[in-house]
Amino acid sequence: MANPLTQVTDALWTLLEANTSFTDLVRAENRIKYDNRDPEKDEVAYSDYPLVRIRESSTHAHPRRASNMTTFAKQYHIQIATGEQSYVSIHNVEWEIIRAFADWTTHLEALEWDVDASNFVKDCQLLTAEQVLDDQKLNRGIRGWSTVWGCLVLFAFQRTALKPS
């Protein structure tokens, strides 16, 4: 089984893709997953939108949260680029992400680390999303709405299970 960090990244995609309204809006080839060496397209066209990426942003670790517990919070960025200037384009994708995250417990709380078979995801929150029109970097030169939405996942492990063997 994959390590917990990879499991969570994969589970975030599974969570989104379990919502068929999301998959109807964002074609599979426009869901940029960093699970291979070069997932980004060299050039984009209007057919490459809307585009969604999940990127890891930051980690804040507490190695000794309690005498027996290590926790850390990992922030992810869910990036949306629409390639359109209509509000509807960004609203539709955002709405389906909100709907998908309503079921985060099914996809994230059930994850287990094979070392001690414990569930390690304790919380998942969507954070602030800031919409921008014409973000050249995110939209890759095509005018349209984009957003970077924060997602915070809280991990917790028994310290004894984390010690290398």
Image (cartoon, helix red, strand yellow):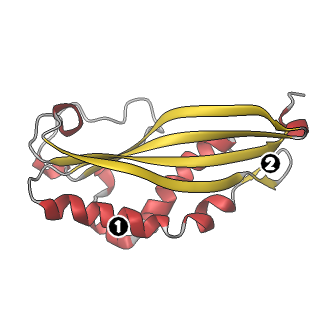
Q: Can you identify the residue that label 1 sits on? A: 96
Query: Residue 109, relative to residue 116: is it above or below?
Result: below
Residue 128: % across, % down: 39, 49
Q: Foreground residue, 140 or 94?
A: 94
Q: How many marks?
A: 2
Amino acid type shown at disc 2: Asp
Amino acid type shown at disc 1: Glu
Contact flag, marks 2 and 1 (Cβ < 8 Å): no
Residue 84: % across, % down: 11, 53
Q: In terms of sequence position, does the residue under pointer 2 or pointer 1 come before the other?
A: 1
Residue 114 marker: 2
Q: Image check: 2 left or right of 25? A: right
Q: Image check: 101 left or right of 23? A: right
Residue 21: % across, % down: 33, 72
Q: Foreground residue, 106 or 130?
A: 130
Query: Residue 19, relative to residue 140: is it above or below?
Result: below
**Residue 140: quadrant of the picture:** top left
Q: Residue at x 55, y 64 (%)?
A: 104
Q: Residue at x 83, y 35 (%)?
A: 162
Q: Which residue is drawn at 24% across and 37% down?
A: 138
Packing grade of label 2 (10 A; few <14, some 14-19, many >=20) is few
Q: In which quarter of the image is the C terminus?
A: top right
- Element marked by disc 1: helix
Residue 85: % across, % down: 8, 53
Q: Gap between marks 2 and 1, in whole Å?
A: 32 Å
Q: Residue at x 68, y 53 (%)?
A: 121
- Element marked by disc 2: loop
